Image (spheres, rainbow, N blue to C red):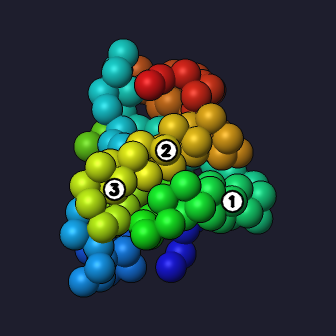
Amino acid sequence: MMQITRHRLEVADLLAEVQSSERGGTCVFLGTVRNDAGVTSIDYSAYEPMAVEEIERILAEAHERWPGSRVMLQHRLGVIPVGEASIAIAAAAPHRDEAFAACRYVIEEVKTRLPVWKKELRGDGSEKWVEAHDHR
């Protein structure tokens, strides 16, 4: 499963990776680019080898905390327009509580630890680098 991509995110692919007959609860999170203060798109960039290593660590931690779960994610790089997803996370576990908890854990850790940079592009032609961790 490609975790870093420059293509549209495919939730169906993530679901296929995490679902099984042993996992009855599934949770999906999509983080989409929103029009905030005239933003038309966000340009995401990363040092990909480092980002992939950190994603793998975060997913391993989630599995360790919720052993019956499976969590996968995709993070998109490049210019992403308003309304399209920049991150997708799917978590499946034997029960819904674990699926929700694992999904929440992964997005919070990604927002805190993933070496991804974002530049807001606005309709007036201006640009602004922002902390990926600025918004909750």
Looking at the figure, which quarter contains the C terminus?
Answer: top left
Q: Residues within 10 Å of mark 2 (few under 14, many from 20)?
A: some
Q: Position of residue 88 (x, y in %)?
A: 38, 56
Please state which amino acid type lies under the numbered disc 2: Tyr
| Displayed quadrant of residue 20 | bottom left
- Can you name the residue that lies furthest to the top here? 37
| Apparent side of residue 103 relative to residue 50 in the rendered image (left or right) | left
Q: Position of residue 106 (x, y in %)?
A: 50, 49
Mark number displayed over residue 99? 3
Please state which amino acid type lies under the numbered disc 3: Ala
Determine if residue 93 is in view: yes
Vertical order, 96 against 3 (above or below): above
Secondary structure category for the residue under label 3 = helix
Secondary structure category for the residue under label 1 = helix
Q: Which residue is drawn at the image coordinates 48% and 59% (left, top)?
A: 66
Chain-order first, disc 3 or disc 1: 1
Mark number displayed over residue 57? 1
Q: CA distance from mark 2 to mark 1?
A: 12 Å
Query: Along the line of sight, which residue is nearer the eye, 126 or 57?
Result: 57
Mark number displayed over residue 105? 2
Q: CA distance from mark 3 to mark 1?
A: 18 Å
Vertical order, 37 against 34 (above or below): above
